Image (cartoon, coloured by chain):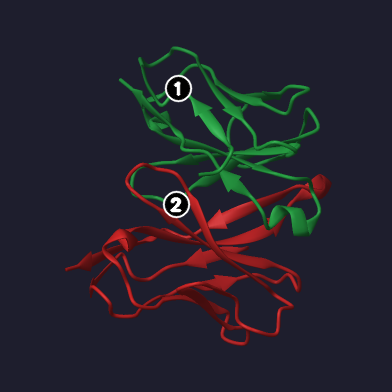
Amino acid sequence: ETGVTQSPTHLIKTRGQQVTLRCSSQSGHNTVSWYQQALGQGPQFIFQYYREEENGRGNFPPRFSGLQFPNYSSELNVNALELDDSALYLCASSGGLARSSYNEQFFGPGTRLTVL
Amino acid sequence: AQKITQTQPGMFVQEKEAVTLDCTYDTSDQSYGLFWYKQPSSGEMIFLIYQGSYDEQNATEGRYSLNFQKARKSANLVISASQLGDSAMYFCAMRVFIIQGAQKLVFGQGTRLTINP
């Protein structure tokens, strides 16, 4: 098991609602990345946070936003939920931006979001 | 554009046999990293093995080895002596650098491996 935890495990929302997903990174890791994995697909990069600032973003609309806290835990917020937002949301933590530290990237168990 | 291609949607193998999962990649970067992850039905991505583009030797981790053929842009995963617990989805991924020094992983579509007793 990695030291990365996510909550909640499962979540059911209706279209138009807002949701907040949480991730606690592995001890000592200051970089958190979020991925969306639709059913039957590989994960897609949403964004990355390094030392409390967003420093990279994938092809996701602004209604996907995030935060990173001083203890390096992170939140993913999604506003105005759409049916296509139904997916497994994974967070991954690593020890920084150096290539060697990125090779040690540990994923959490994920949050499965269902939008009805 | 950086891309990972996994052409085997599903693989069925007898227990104790070796299995090779295919992965090809496309990048114009000289420096990159290739990863394999295992995803059981629980959903967690479990890191298996890593190969850097400048590594001259193929990476090995226990029963896992990565057959890295740089000229062909392939990074196949070989699992020796397969076990029932190896049944899962397997993803090949490539580390890609984006603006501001950030990095991301680009994943393939995955291969579902089933080990038969």
Q: Is residue B10 left or right of residue A62?
A: left
Rendered residue at 46%/35% (across/down) = A110
Quadrant holding the C terminus of chain B: bottom left
The green-coloured chain is labelled A
Name the amino acid, label 2: Gly
Which chain identifier belongs to the red chain? B
Q: Quadrant of residue B71?
A: bottom right
Query: Which of the two residues, B32 or A94, is positioned nearer the viewer here?
Result: A94
Residue denoted by label 1:
A8
Q: Which residue is found at the position 52% from the left and 46% from the top?
A: A44
- Depth order, front residue of A80/B96: B96
Residue B111 quadrant: bottom left
Q: Residues within 10 Å of mark 1 (few under 14, many from 20)?
A: some
Q: Is residue A65 left or right of residue A85?
A: right
Read off the residue under disc 2.
A42
Query: SS class of the residue under badge 1?
Result: loop
The percent position of residue B96, horizontal first and vertical second, equals 68, 58
